[in-house]
């Protein structure tokens, strides 16, 4: 009977890479969990996908970050890289528009990885739950190799 009140959900990795603790992000906004709680990913891929089923609620004009509301009511943010907003969208291609319902693994943004690395941008990417007040617990899956749309990056209870 108590399991009903502790329903567990998972967020899949939005990109290929290796997960690590959010506190190690080179940006204090993410490292200090000011924008939400979750996990960081040292990316190796160039396609960023939906981490769960839900609605794409936001894609920033510069295409370096997107948000979604999952079917569970939780809201997430994927922020591609550190200080990448400075590029004004160069190196990022939007593959979908906000307002669309998607399934986990649906491609959202494609990056020009070579271009971003040539410009010396860090591509560490936080996956954040932004309405953490609605969770009972958030468990990042750390130090794991993950595939976009497949590997579990975060488990959480509501």
Image (cartoon, rainbow, N blue to C red):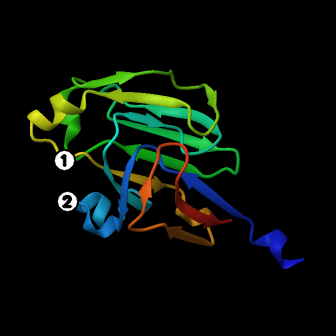
Mark nearer the viewer, 1 or 2? 1
Q: Residue furthest bottom?
A: 2
* Mark nearer the N terminus (1 vs 2): 2
Q: Residue at x 22, y 57 (%)?
A: 27
Q: Is residue 49 above or below residue 6?
A: above
Left or right position of 150 against 142: right
SS of the residue at dot 2? loop
What residue is drawn where x is 9% and y is 34%? 119
Circle 1 sits on which residue? 122
Residue bearing mark 2:
26
Q: Looking at the image, which residue sits at the far left? A: 119
Figure quadrant of the N terminus: bottom right
66 to the left or right of 62: right
Measured from the top left, where is residue 73 in percent x and y?
A: 67, 50
Q: Where 135 sits versus 129, above or below? A: below
Q: CA distance from mark 1 to mark 2?
A: 9 Å
* Residue neighbourhood size for the residue with mark 1, other residues' Cα within 10 Å, grouped as few (<14), some (14–19), many (≥20): some
Percent coordinates x, y for residue 21 in the rendering: 35, 68
Q: Are marks 1 and 2 in contact (CB under 8 Å)?
A: yes
**Residue found at the very far right of the displayed protein:** 1
- Where residue 131 sits in the image (x, y, percent)? 54, 57
Query: Helix, strand or loop at disc 1?
Result: loop
- Residue at 48% across, 40% down: 67
| Closer to the camera in the image, 85 or 133 | 85
Q: Residue at x 49, y 55 (%)?
A: 130
Residue 61 in which image quadrant? top left
Kindly identify which numbered label has been placed on residue 108. Answer: none
Question: Relative to residue 154, is residue 3 drawn left or right?
Answer: right
Q: Is residue 37 left or right of residue 10?
A: left
Looking at the rendering, which quadrant does residue 45 occupy?
A: top left
| Position of the C terminus by quadrant | bottom right
């Amino acid at each position: 009977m108590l399991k009903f009140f502790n329903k567990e959900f998972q967020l899949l990795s939005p990109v290929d890479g290796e997960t690590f603790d959010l506190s190690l992000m080179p940006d204090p906004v993410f490292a200090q969990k000011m924008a939400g709680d979750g996990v960081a990913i040292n990316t190796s891929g160039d396609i960023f996908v939906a981490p769960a089923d839900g609605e794409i609620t936001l894609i920033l004009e510069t295409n370096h970050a997107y948000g979604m509301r999952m079917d569970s009511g939780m809201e997430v943010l994927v922020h591609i890289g550190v200080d990448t907003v400075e590029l004004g969208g160069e190196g990022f291609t939007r593959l979908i528009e906000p307002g669309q319902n998607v399934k986990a693994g649906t491609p959202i943004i494609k990056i020009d990885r070579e271009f971003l690395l040539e410009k010396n941008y860090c591509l560490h990417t936080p996956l954040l739950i932004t309405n953490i007040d609605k969770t009972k617990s958030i468990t990042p899956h750390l130090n794991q190799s993950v595939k976009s749309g497949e590997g579990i990056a975060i488990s959480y209870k509501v």
